[in-house]
Amino acid sequence: MAFRKKKQEVLYREESKICSGEVIGLRNARIGFRQQEMTHIMENILYNELMVRQFSVDVGVVYAREKNEKGNSVRTAREIDFVVNSGGKRSYIQSAYAKPTEEKSEIELRPFFLTKDFFPKIVVWKEGGKRWYDDYGVLHINLIDFLLDKAVI
């Protein structure tokens, strides 16, 4: 598995996360209130919480071979929102704003399967019921429970 950061993507992601500081309003003021996407705001909240918990946080990129429209095999990059490290422990976290439909779950889980390792994998949903583990051992948890439970990672 390769971890790499595209310069533009990282600059944007880091700037939006750092500029939000502890208050989402600062982020909005910084970008001129032009981007009100809840998905990005939720990622910022998760990032800030992970930093408060003193984890080392990276963006993960894994690669897969997929067929394009012409049937040719192409190398495709898939992103893991957060690769969280602390000492010798590592966890993968995906942020998912929308309610978990089967199609959305598949999209969020696809990068996890490409890691080919056994580190804990977590999908944080904005809404949802109680936490649960799917057939692949991935923890699904809602945002509030994730923020309140320091032992989840």
Image: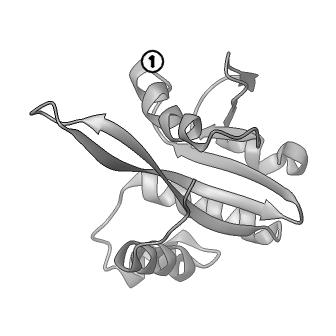
Q: Amino acid at mark 1?
A: Glu
Q: Residue at x 73, y 22 (%)?
A: 133
Q: Give coordinates of residue 100: x percent, y percent.
A: 50, 25
- The answer to which image quadrant residue 50 occupies is bottom right
Residue 90 percent coordinates (x, y):
78, 54
Q: Is residue 61 left or right of residue 135?
A: left
Colour scheme employed for the rendering of this structure: one colour
Drawn side of residue 148 relative to residue 73, left or right: right
| Res. 59 image quadrant | bottom right
Vertical order, 32 against 96 (above or below):
below
Look at 27% across and 70% down and name the residue there.
Answer: 34
Residue 138 appears in the rendering: yes
Question: Which of the two residues, 51 or 88, is positioned nearer the viewer here?
Answer: 88
Q: Position of residue 79 (x, y in %)?
A: 46, 52
Q: What secondary structure is found at the residue carrying circle 1?
A: helix
Does residue 130 show up?
Answer: no
Q: Measuring 68% from the left and 67% from the top, which residue is drawn there?
A: 57
Where residue 83 appears, as percent x and y from the top left, is: 65, 58
Rate crowding at label 1 as few (under 14), some (14 to 19) or many (20 or more) other CA atoms within 10 Å. Answer: few
Give the residue drawn at x 53%, y 33%. 109
User: What is the residue that sits farthest to the front in this orientation?
Assistant: 72
Which residue position is annotated with label 1? 102
